[in-house]
Amino acid sequence: MPGTDSPCCFRSGSCGDSTMRILWELSTECNLGCDFCHTKVDRGGAQRLGLAEIQARLGSLAALGVSDVIFSGGEPLLHPHLFPILESAAALGFHLDLCTNGTLATADTARLLSGLLTEISVSFDASQKATFEKMRGIGGSYEQVLRGITCLQKAGLEIHGIIMVDARSFLHLKNTVSSLEAMGIHSVTLLGRMQTEPLDGAPSWRVDSRVLQDALGDLRAVSRIPVNTKRLLFTPTRFRCPAGTAFRSIDSKGRLLPCILMKNMTPELLDSWVTEFEADKASRCGHCEYRSWCGGGCPGAACLFGHASQVDVLCPHRQSG
């Protein structure tokens, strides 16, 4: 079955509509130790807002016409006020998605979530246990997520699978997608890994884009559910980053940001990120054959290191500078 391909980790499809979506990082606290998570570079430690402040912010977002709220983390199921937060958000009419690692889902939490969420996204990187637990950093997490998905499925939730694709999970990609399909998952998204440290040459975990394209074609030819990609293929595109317009983020400290990847930037850099991105694109993309129409990829990727916004650090056409 076909799927959609997006250069953005947090928004798929066309970004030209009039709706606004919010990704809300409820907390950076997590029960797993994933070696690829962008939250691990957070410099403020585990933080979260109180219930009253979150409820007030939700009211403000509704007044601004926000349509969708995606609650993430860290692991949102660890937040002590998650269900009152979801109840308040649902009462305001938001479409709600929860991004979770799934290991903490029980029959009781699944039953409560089923009456509040529009959908739920669960990470499941590999059907092979050793690879899954190596990526997630905790022994026993493979059985935990399988139990969690079963609970969510029995509660009638619309579940979407997320596979973080790197050289480890790619080896099991076909079997992983098949396993998720067999579980009754509605769709699968293959998510490109985020570079969480400054680059010094090509990252060892990266899979060649031509190999990825071939594998994706094979998957879509046999899969009965949509297989989508986000920031995985790095093919030139007319995509323009929706950060700060159709898409915004709120971090665990309550700051409204253009994108969650920009949470380590100083206020001064946040104010000038568009200008900095365009200047970097003019410098690095001046001789690129795609320069006249490519959007430059993800402008927030380099911000994980505290730098000003730059052309996507993993773009294969990116020039040094």
Image (cartoon, rainbow, N blue to C red):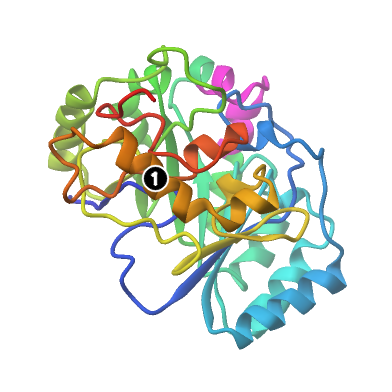
Q: Residues within 10 Å of mark 1 (few under 14, many from 20)?
A: some
Q: Main secondary structure of the magenta part?
A: helix
As drawn, is 37 to the left or to the right of 5? right
Instruction: Give SS at disc 1.
Output: helix
Residue 157 placement (x, y as % from top left): 51, 62
In the image, is residue 59 above or below residue 74?
A: below
Q: Identify the residue at horizontal 65%, vertical 44% (top origin).
A: 265
Find the magenta span and give its range.
132-146
Residue 130 or residue 208, whichever sits in front: 208
Q: Nearer the viewer, residue 17 or 240?
A: 240
Q: Looking at the image, can residue 190 be seen?
A: no
Above or below: residue 32 compared with residue 105: above
Whether residue 154 is visible, yes or no, is yes
Q: Residue at x 48, y 33 (%)?
A: 194
Q: Residue at x 61, y 27 (%)?
A: 34
Residue that extends furthest to the bottom in the rendered view of this protein? 63
Question: What residue does disc 1 label?
Answer: 279
Measuring from the top left, give residue 133's x and y in whole percent: 58, 21
